[in-house]
Image (cartoon, rainbow, N blue to C red):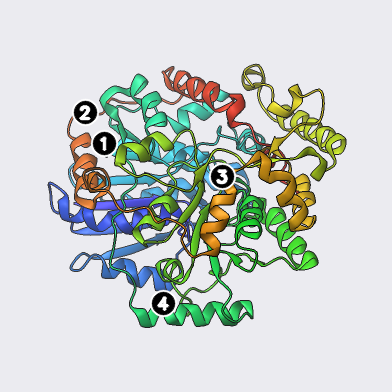
């Protein structure tokens, strides 16, 4: 059997990491031998990652199929008709000898909306050949990514129903996978046994050799031009939803001498303004912040596990995650973690048995630390512009942002500020912001004392996690869910179906007030 792995690109990030970790277990645990693996993508990975991936699959040929039209639509300059033609030709070539008896397509993030033409055409191609399609959803386009709507409209998806049919195709032999229980519950209500909650796999691996950790220390010291300063690591790409300014604020408050190091750069042109604004502010104010240390050619750089081992602490300040792999990476690396609790994944982590001693809900900011009237006006303007990008159905369901209800200046969560206001807070002297905000966040004093004494607490890896997150358990759940899939029925383009109802349920949940963040309303920093 051939395993086709489809993704828009193979840039560093969580999805590539899941592919890298999961593929060997899927090959080993498959009920029928997988004798060939094909990575089908719009952009090839760097050679170091590719070589490593092949090493994890001894005896199994690995091919890389590059078709640029599979990449993000925002990075392509051709007409929708031309891109569609290229996608169809690419899929015909990719699946030339494929059928229901000899292959499986494992497709990642079709629901993020970066290329709904690929989502739609891949579903049709699999249906025509009666090939099982596993649609593995890590993120959703309707989850604070409404900037995608205009792009999708431009590429021919002129209604929410049309977008829904591309994300949730009316094809019976399709398995929809969600990586958190909250999303999986929505899918299961509509798709029954054609939906699966499959948490990302993670296992504590042996720590990197001491020599490699020392080499990572030296590399960081040279990169940052420092001598012995502690490193606090944010293992992620430089994206707005990672809320990186909050990680910097916590680092400066709790460990003023430390450097905050972010592993990845911006992964798309949309995120470049955020990256550039943070970088300019760091240079201007001489903040100990370094973004994207692993960007570019990775062949002569430390790996993420080596950087984790070389760091004093790990942070995760995201306002939006599908799974939150850094929670588990910190525990696996025996590093202390300081992290936000995210309402959609905290229950999952509890179920796995993890207990994180340094997590918080919000960091409250005293209103005198930023220009309240200007921030209120900025948020209202950005919210109106963001809301205007939505179709009428979504506009009617959006909740009122929390700050709008406040008649007078009051404490505001740092995560609910625009980037402009966040940078205003960071630009003030640390002693001033600490004194003003400590009464609002008294737990930080304990964490500061622990950090100064080198006693931040580490989360042990719980025994219960193995049954949820181990590679063998992951592969068994994956293949067990494929067994009850019904035989495919012929699908006709434009067939009325339930996908619009699935998407409507998701939209209602994602537009709740607790999920609204000003950072995500305006892509131009």
Task: Name the residue tied to disc 3.
Answer: 443
How many C-alpha atoms fall within 10 Å of the one at disc 3: few (<14), some, or many (≥20)? few
Residue 68, given in percent of the width and then of the height, sits at 51, 57
Number of the label disc, if any, that sits on residue 421: none
* Pointer 2 or 3: first along the chain: 3
* Mark 1 → mark 2, Cα distance in angstroms: 8 Å
Between 150 and 18, the one nearer to me in the picture: 18
Task: Name the residue tied to disc 2.
Answer: 487
Task: Name the residue tied to disc 1.
Answer: 130
* Pointer 4 or 3: first along the chain: 4
* Mark 2 → mark 3, Cα distance in angstroms: 56 Å
How many C-alpha atoms fall within 10 Å of the one at disc 4: few (<14), some, or many (≥20)? many
Contact, CB < 8 Å: mark 1 with mark 2? yes
The image shows residue 212, relative to residue 41, as above or below, that is below
- Local secondary structure at mark 2: loop
Task: Name the residue tied to disc 4.
Answer: 213
């Amino acid at each position: 059997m051939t395993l086709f792995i489809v993704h828009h690109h193979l840039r560093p990030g969580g999805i590539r990491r899941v592919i890298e970790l999961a593929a060997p277990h899927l090959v080993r645990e498959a009920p029928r031998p997988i004798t060939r693996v094909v990575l089908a993508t719009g952009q090839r990975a760097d050679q170091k990652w590719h070589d490593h991936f092949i090493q994890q699959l001894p005896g199994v040929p690995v091919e890389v199929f590059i078709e640029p039209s599979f990449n993000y639509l925002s990075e392509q300059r051709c007409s929708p008709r031309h891109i569609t033609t290229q996608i169809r030709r690419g899929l015909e070539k990719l699946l030339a000898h494929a059928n229901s008896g000899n292959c499986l397509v494992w497709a990642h993030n079709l629901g993020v909306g970066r290329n709904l033409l690929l989502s739609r055409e891949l579903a049709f191609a699999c249906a025509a050949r009666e090939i099982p399609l596993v649609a593995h959803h890590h993120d959703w386009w309707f989850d604070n990514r409404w900037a995608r709507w205009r792009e999708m409209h431009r590429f021919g998806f002129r209604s929410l129903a049309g977008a829904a049919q591309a994300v949730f195709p009316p094809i019976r032999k399709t398995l929809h996978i969600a990586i958190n229980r909250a999303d999986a519950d929505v899918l299961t209500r509509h798709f029954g046994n054609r939906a699966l909650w499959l948490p990302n796999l993670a296992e504590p691996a042996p720590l990197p050799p001491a020599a490699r950790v020392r080499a990572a220390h030296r590399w960081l010291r040279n990169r940052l031009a420092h001598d012995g300063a502690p490193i606090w690591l944010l293992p992620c790409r430089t994206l707005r939803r990672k809320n990186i300014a909050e990680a910097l604020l916590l680092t400066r408050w709790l460990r003023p001498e430390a450097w905050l190091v972010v592993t990845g750069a911006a992964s798309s042109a949309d995120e470049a303004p955020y990256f550039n604004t943070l970088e300019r502010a760091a240079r201007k104010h001489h903040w100990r912040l370094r973004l994207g240390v692993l960007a570019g050619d990775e062949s002569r750089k430390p790996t993420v596990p080596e950087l984790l081992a070389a760091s004093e602490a790990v942070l995760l300040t995201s306002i939006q995650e599908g799974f939150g792999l850094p929670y588990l990476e910190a525990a696996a690396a025996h590093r202390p973690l300081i992290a936000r609790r995210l309402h959609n994944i905290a229950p999952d982590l509890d179920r796995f048995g993890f207990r994180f001693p340094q997590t918080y809900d919000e960091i409250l900011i005293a209103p005198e630390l930023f220009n309240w009237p200007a921030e209120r006006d900025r948020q209202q303007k950005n919210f109106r512009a963001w809301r205007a990008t939505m179709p009428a159905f979504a506009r009617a369901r959006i909740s009122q942002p929390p700050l709008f209800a406040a008649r007078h200046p009051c404490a505001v969560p740092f995560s609910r500020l625009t980037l402009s206001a966040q940078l205003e807070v960071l630009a003030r002297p640390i002693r001033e912001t600490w004194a003003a905000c400590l009464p609002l966040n008294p737990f930080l004093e304990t964490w500061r004392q622990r950090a100064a004494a080198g006693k931040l607490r580490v989360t042990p890896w719980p025994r219960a996690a193995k049954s949820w997150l181990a590679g063998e358990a992951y592969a068994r759940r994956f293949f067990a869910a494929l067994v009850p899939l019904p035989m495919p029925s012929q699908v006709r383009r434009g067939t009325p179906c339930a996908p619009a109802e699935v998407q409507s349920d998701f939209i209602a949940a994602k537009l709740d007030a607790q999920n609204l963040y000003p950072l995500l309303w305006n892509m131009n920093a």
